[in-house]
Amino acid sequence: MAINNPYQSYQQNSVNTASPGELTLMLYNGCLKFILLGKKAMEAGKIEEKNTNIIKAQNIVHELMVTLNMDVAVSKELMSLYDYMNRRLIDANLKNDIAALEEVEGLVTEFRNTWKEAIQLNRQKQFVQSGLV
């Protein structure tokens, strides 16, 4: 009989019930988490741990790339930025370049903050339109 981990159940439920916008926010947050873990491992000289975490950040960037709707003009610009971030993550991993990691961290933080604000504005708009105000 398997013992259920309540945290894992909560986390799985959060992903399963999230809107597409919330899922994108989760991806940005996950990417930041793995960049920070990669940076700490790099500073501590833990090469395998650094590599694992930077690759996880790259995988998230790849996921962001494949979810773009290329029929929307801004998606082409985002694709270029995501591609740049991916190349900088590769550089950071190969060259132990903390500055490259910090550059990507800054970009992902901006994306995350902008996305979070857009979600909040959309919720406010829906709330007002529902007539509950």
Image: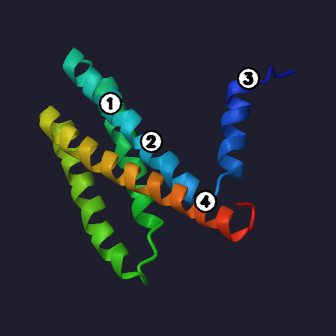
Q: Quadrant of residue 80?
A: bottom left
Look at the numbered disc 1 and give the secondary structure of its residue.
helix
The residue lying toward the viewer, choosing from 98 and 25, is 25
Residue in view at x 16 percent, y 32 percent:
98
- Residue 29, which numbered label? 2
Q: The disc labelled 4 sits on which kind of residue?
A: Arg
Q: The disc labelled 3 sits on which kind of residue?
A: Asn
Q: Are marks 1 and 3 in contact (CB under 8 Å)?
A: no
Per the image, the residue denoted by label 4 is 123
Per the image, the residue denoted by label 1 is 36
Q: From the image, state whether disc 1 or disc 3 is nearer to you.
A: 1
Q: The disc labelled 2 sits on which kind of residue?
A: Asn
Q: Residue furthest right?
A: 1
Q: Is residue 42 visible?
A: yes
- Distance between the alpha carbons at the discs numbered 1 and 4: 30 Å
Q: The disc labelled 1 sits on which kind of residue?
A: Leu
Per the image, the residue denoted by label 3 is 5
Q: Residue furthest top?
A: 44
